[in-house]
Amino acid sequence: MTPDILAMLIPIFGILGFSSIAIVRIILRADERKLELRLRLKQNGDADIAKVIDDLRAEIASIRDNGSQYDLSLDNTMHRLERRIEHLEGNLRVQIRPAPPEAETVQQVGQNL
């Protein structure tokens, strides 16, 4: 290479070098901002997820309480129905009791029936 061409290439490479450094710097800053935003979203997302989990736990506890109340209510209702059925069966037994056997009438000689 001749010194004239070398003299022309040095400023061109210098300009390209500085501009490429600036471009790389801009790209790295953009990546850094993206990472910061992702981290913020993750931290906020973790807080939101924790809140949702707590809400779900409270709802499950409420459902358990309601389920227990319904179980007790159903159990009480079944006991009442059993007592009513036993009472009705007892009344039915009293009404259906067979009549005592009547004495057989046997005709004897010389008696009128």
Image (cartoon, rainbow, N blue to C red):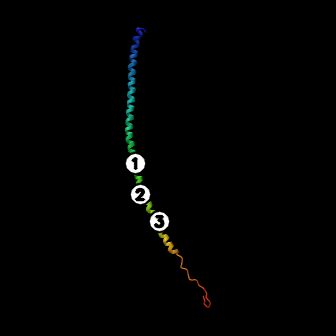
Residue at 42 percent across and 8 percent down: it is 2
Distance (Cα) linking label 1 and label 2: 18 Å
> 98 and 14: which one is in front?
98
List x then y, in percent, for residue 35.
39, 32
- In the rendered image of this protein, does residue 67 appear above or below residue 12? below
Amino acid carrying mark 1 in the image:
Arg
Please name the residue that numbered disc 2 is placed on: 69
92 horizontally vs 22: left or right: right
Residue at 40 percent across and 45 percent down: it is 53
Q: Secondary structure at mark 1?
A: helix
> 87 and 109: which one is in front?
109
Residue at 40 percent across and 42 percent down: it is 49
The label on residue 82 is 3
- Within 10 Å of disc 1 (Cα), the crowding (few <14, some 14-19, many 20+) is few
Front disc: 1 or 3: 3
Front disc: 3 or 2: 3
Please name the residue that numbered disc 1 is placed on: 57
Sequence order check, earlier mark of 1 and 2: 1
- Within 10 Å of disc 3 (Cα), the crowding (few <14, some 14-19, many 20+) is few
Quadrant where the C terminus is found in the figure: bottom right
Amino acid carrying mark 3 in the image:
Glu
- Within 10 Å of disc 2 (Cα), the crowding (few <14, some 14-19, many 20+) is few
Mark 3 vs 2: CB contact within 8 A: no
Mark 1 vs 3: CB contact within 8 A: no
